[in-house]
Image (cartoon, rainbow, N blue to C red):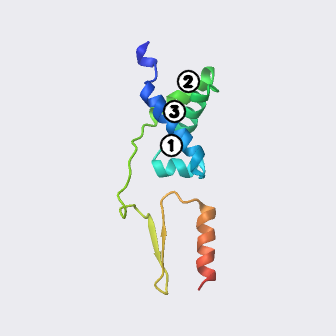
């Protein structure tokens, strides 16, 4: 039975992450991306801590959370992987981070095109 109980330290870690996400002002997707968490893992823990998951749904959520392990990692300044860098004809550069959403990318590229 003790193997099934969730470590209280892990619960507290997730309580802090969920509170931090609420204060961050960013979307859950962006918050999770910045911290290398998966969204299903985040939502499973939020539901679990709020007591809103029951029965089979609870088992699925816990299974997904267990399968999606993570490590909190912070990058040293200047070491972030930019993903893609576009070098424009006039020499300007646009760095595109991994995981950027399509709408944001379109907006940036449109603005760059308008400024030419």
Q: Which mark is residue 105?
A: none
Read off the residue under disc 3: 64
Residue 92's place in the image compared with 11, above or below, is below
| Label 1, residues with CA under 10 Å away: few <14, some 14-19, many ≥20 | some
- Is residue 111 found left or right of 95 in the rendered image? right
Read off the residue under disc 1: 38
Q: CA distance from mark 1 to mark 2?
A: 18 Å
For the C terminus, give its image quadrant.
bottom right
Residue at image coords 52%, 28%: 62
x and y, in percent, of residue 59 in the image: 55, 24
Residue at image coords 55%, 52%: 30
Say what secondary structure mark 2 lies in.
helix
Q: Nearer the viewer, mark 1 or mark 3?
A: 1
Read off the residue under disc 2: 59
For the N terminus, give its image quadrant.
top left
Please say if the residues under marks 1 and 2 sit with CB atoms less than 8 Å apart.
Answer: no
x and y, in percent, of residue 56 in the image: 61, 22
x and y, in percent, of residue 88 in the image: 49, 81
Q: CA distance from mark 1 to mark 3?
A: 10 Å
Residue 89's place in the image compared with 14, above or below, is below
Pick whichever of labels 2 and 3 is earlier in the sequence.
2
Q: Quadrant of residue 42?
A: top right
Pick whichever of labels 1 and 3 is earlier in the sequence.
1
């Amino acid at each position: 039975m003790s193997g099934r109980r969730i470590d209280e330290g892990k619960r507290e870690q997730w309580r802090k992450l969920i509170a931090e996400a609420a204060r961050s002002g960013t979307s859950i997707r962006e918050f999770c991306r910045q911290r290398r968490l998966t969204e299903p893992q985040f939502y499973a823990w939020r539901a679990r801590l709020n007591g809103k998951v029951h029965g089979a749904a609870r088992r699925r959520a816990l299974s997904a959370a267990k399968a999606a392990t993570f490590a909190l990692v912070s990058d040293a300044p200047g070491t972030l992987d930019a993903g893609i860098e576009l070098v424009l004809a006039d020499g300007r550069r646009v760095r595109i981070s991994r995981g950027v959403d399509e709408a944001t990318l379109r907006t940036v590229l449109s603005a760059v095109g308008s400024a030419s």
